[in-house]
Image (cartoon, grey):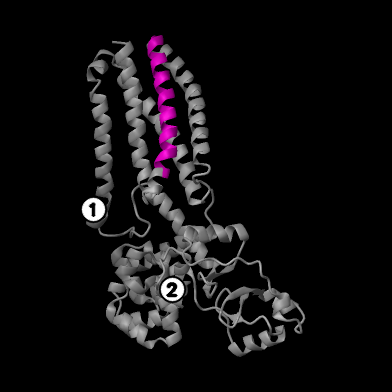
Amino acid sequence: MTNSPQHENTHEHLRLLTGNLDSGALSQIKRQVNELHPAEIANLLESLPLQHRRIVWELTNPELAGDILVEVNDEVRQGLIEHTDEKDLITAAVSLETDDLADIFEDLPQAVLHQVVRSMSNQDRRRLQSVMSYDEDSAGGLMNPDVVTIRPNVDLDVVLRYLRQRGELPANTDKLFVVDREDRYLGILNISDLLTQSKKESVSRVMLTDQKALPPSLSANEVALFFEDYNLLSAPVVDEKNHLLGRITVDDVVDVIRDEADRSILNLAGLDEDDDMFAPVTRSAKRRAVWLGINLFTAFLAAWVIGLFAATIQQIVALAVLMPIVASMGGIAGSQTLMLVIRGIALNQIGKSNSRWLLWKELAVGGLNGLLWASVVAVITALWFQNQALGLLIGAALVINFIGAALAGATIPLTLKRLNIDPAIAGGVILTTVTDVIGFFSFLGLAALFLT
């Protein structure tokens, strides 16, 4: 697998920057950093230890600070804000678009917020208040209220003159939104149609009315799926009365997709995607200690089950050798089902109407794979220990554990979802405990019944 050019550039920038930091070449650092895009600078800052990060941040052009603060994760942003002069923070915040300002608004000191709000126009204040009134992980929180609206009863020539008079368009504008006099959403006018159709045509004849609008309460994940399904670059957001509130653009959706991917990977280990990779040791240790403690409790639970059959294990030493096979195979089988169901939940493909069918399907898959690999393990065990009964017992335990793993892998994430708990965070820990307990109990229990 080869690295992408972007990753190669990041590695090269980081190598050069680290070399300049070690040699104290501050002027070269300043020139190197300020020639980069804000997203690249943000990536570099997240990749640097705290002492180096502060040096680079102090050498960064204040005009880029706002865009950089939006790009870095929450914990890194808080650290940068703490080491930034209030005057520079105000300049950085004022330079941001409304939706970006809303993303970092609550992280800014009160004195800075007061100055920023005072410097805004009444219209911008209303826009900011509108975005801030919605959850940040919703369509309302993602939207930018800065939109270009037009009426349906004007000609394209009038629209073109209006746009020239404006002088500039909001970033990533691929369409204009058609509204009535009460700002109710009617449809869209693509920029491509505006430029290619006859100037004498009216907006009402050229506009498209089949572009669906999003409610502000729609989750960010559902917004991303909507953009994927309809291959959109932007989409309108409307309230319950169909009033146009703003628009969501594809750059925001890309951020959602990346954040969701990071969250899914890190949550499996009990970590947060907003954690600083170079946070102080004590802070990182404290966070991880919580999940290590939970895992220790579940490990003791599995050990307790093994302890119930200590006498059996002492009589038949082979059981201790074979136990990891039962637990490992069940754990892998359960993880396959768990990941499948978590993905289905994330894509809104699993609900009450099909969850039962999926459960039966996974139980069937677990049973079939259980029979297949139980046969393989039973034959190997019988030949290895010259004991056919032991081979049959471990085969039976594997079938039981495969079915139990499938049941747990399918039901755990659905249950956690109903309890408003992220399945990606707790699902793996619970599944490991279930498969270990079922595997050990079935294998050792059968051995206690039939071999002693």
Circle nearer the viewer, 2 or 1: 2
Disc sitting over residue 328 in the figure: none
Q: Is residue 108 left or right of residue 380?
A: left
Q: Which residues are magenta?
A: 386-414
For image coordinates 44% across by 83% down, the residue present is 124
- Within 10 Å of disc 2 (Cα), the crowding (few <14, some 14-19, many 20+) is many
Magenta highlight: main SS: helix
**Disc 2 on helix, strand or loop?**
helix
Residue in front for this viewpoint, 170 or 40: 170
Q: Is residue 140 left or right of residue 49?
A: right
Residue under circle 1? Answer: 286
Residue under circle 2? Answer: 131
Q: Position of residue 23 (x, y in %)?
A: 33, 68
Count of numbered badges drawn on the protein: 2
Magenta stretch: residue 388 in it? yes
**Does the image show residue 90?**
yes
**Disc 1 on helix, strand or loop?**
helix
Please tell me whether residue 154 is drawn above or below residue 302 in the rendered image: below
For image coordinates 39% across by 10% down, the residue present is 389
Q: Is residue 334 left or right of residue 312?
A: right
For image coordinates 36% across by 29% down, the residue present is 327
**Does the image show residue 95?**
no
**Quarter-wise, where is residue 381 in the image?**
top left
Q: Position of residue 256 (x, y in %)?
A: 47, 61
Q: Position of residue 270 (x, y in %)?
A: 33, 49
Magenta stretch: residue 418 in it? no
Q: What's under tag 1, amino acid-wise?
A: Lys
Q: What's under tag 2, amino acid-wise?
A: Val
Residue in front for this viewpoint, 51 or 243: 243
Quarter of the figure that contains the C terminus: top left
